[in-house]
Image: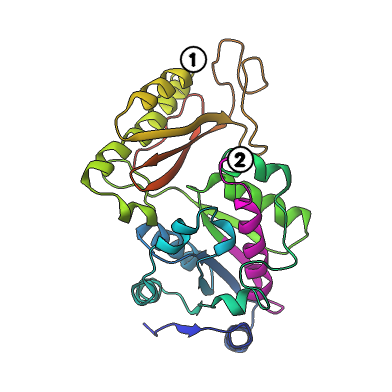
Amino acid sequence: MTPPQVLTTVSSFRAALAEAVAAHVRERGAAPAVGLVPTMGALHSGHAALVDAARAASDIVIASIFVNPLQFDDDADYLHYPRTPERDVALLGAHGVDLIFTPDLAQMYPGDSHAPLVRVSAGQLGTRWEGAARPGHFDGVVTVVAKLFNIMSPPAPARLEAWFGAKDAEQVAIITRMTADLNIDVDIRTVPIVRDEHGLALSSRNQRLDETDYSAALAIPAALFALSEDAASERRLGVADQVEELRSAEGVELDYLVVVDPDSLEELQPGDALLDEHGVLRGRALALIAARVGPVRLIDNVILSPGRSQPRE
């Protein structure tokens, strides 16, 4: 397998992508599909699943590695975010990425790396749940993603598809809405959550959990799976019961556990179109959870559907 090209500047990346597109057109006589996997590094098998999905669907696969300071509301979290660039490049290369964009702060935010003058707003969607808990977080996300889409979009006649993990369900909903509202020509694709053998959603932050923290963190997917079983069995969703269990669980500091409309992210109430007056789900919904365990904040989610439970792995 040919090692990927690693580009550190906007101009060098654009030139390399343009050449890759031109080469494909010359050799195949057709417009290539370009699959983009944006990352913040510290990659794991969940990211590998994203790359594998992009590789299977695309002619050219590109990825970015950039730890975006705008989406951290805690300076300590930003400073301690795991950074493993050599291992990340090796993983991306092993899974078939062709071009890797690894900009520094000056490339992404020229002029003032921590306070660009012009930003994108996530609007009302960005103020719910994670947005409420981490003010400005989703503004930082959509700002950097909009920039990456602009920088990494291929020249015509190629088309761009961007791949995201379903674990960041709020982020996917907001980015999808952003591309529609701002008429950004990119198709958003998602890959199901990758979980370990005990059901914990894979996350770069899991590296900071010790053995005790890890055991405590398993209460998070357990609560989601219980709600999934309620929905599948067409029973009343036991959200309050799961909240009570989590609040009494040792080592877990619950922020929220809610069931929402997957598009608007608004919390469902009994009597809504998706939830009857008895609390029984009658349509597709999304359960969201966030909790602090040890030194890290963990998020997770599961799609709820009447008659269908979600797999645990």
> Residue 202 in magenta?
no
- Residue corresponding to mark 1: 236
Q: Is residue 261 left or right of residue 93?
A: right
Q: Which residues are magenta?
A: 133-162
The mark lying in front, picked from 2 and 1, is 2
Q: Is residue 7 above or below residue 33?
A: below
Where does residue 230 sit, x and y in percent of width and height? 44, 21
Residue at point 33%, 73% (across, down): 87
Where does residue 214 sit, x and y in percent of width and height? 27, 43
Q: Is residue 13 left or right of residue 298?
A: right
Q: Is residue 123 left or right of residue 57?
A: right
Residue at point 45%, 24% (across, down): 232
* Residue nearer the viewer, 159 or 213: 213
Calculate the distance from the C-alpha at mark 2 to the C-alpha at mark 1. Answer: 27 Å
Quadrant (top left, top right, bottom left, bottom right) of the N terminus: bottom left
Residue at point 45%, 57% (across, down): 76
Secondary structure type for disc 2: helix
Secondary structure type for disc 1: loop
Where does residue 88 sit, x and y in percent of width and height? 38, 71
Q: Is residue 164 above or below residue 147?
A: above
Quadrant (top left, top right, bottom left, bottom right) of the C terminus: top left
Mark 1 crowd level (few <14, some 14–19, many ≥20, 10 Å Cα)? some
* Residue nearer the viewer, 85 or 194: 85
Mark seen at residue 169:
none
Amino acid at the residue labelled 1: Arg
- Residue corresponding to mark 2: 132
> Residue 156 in magenta?
yes
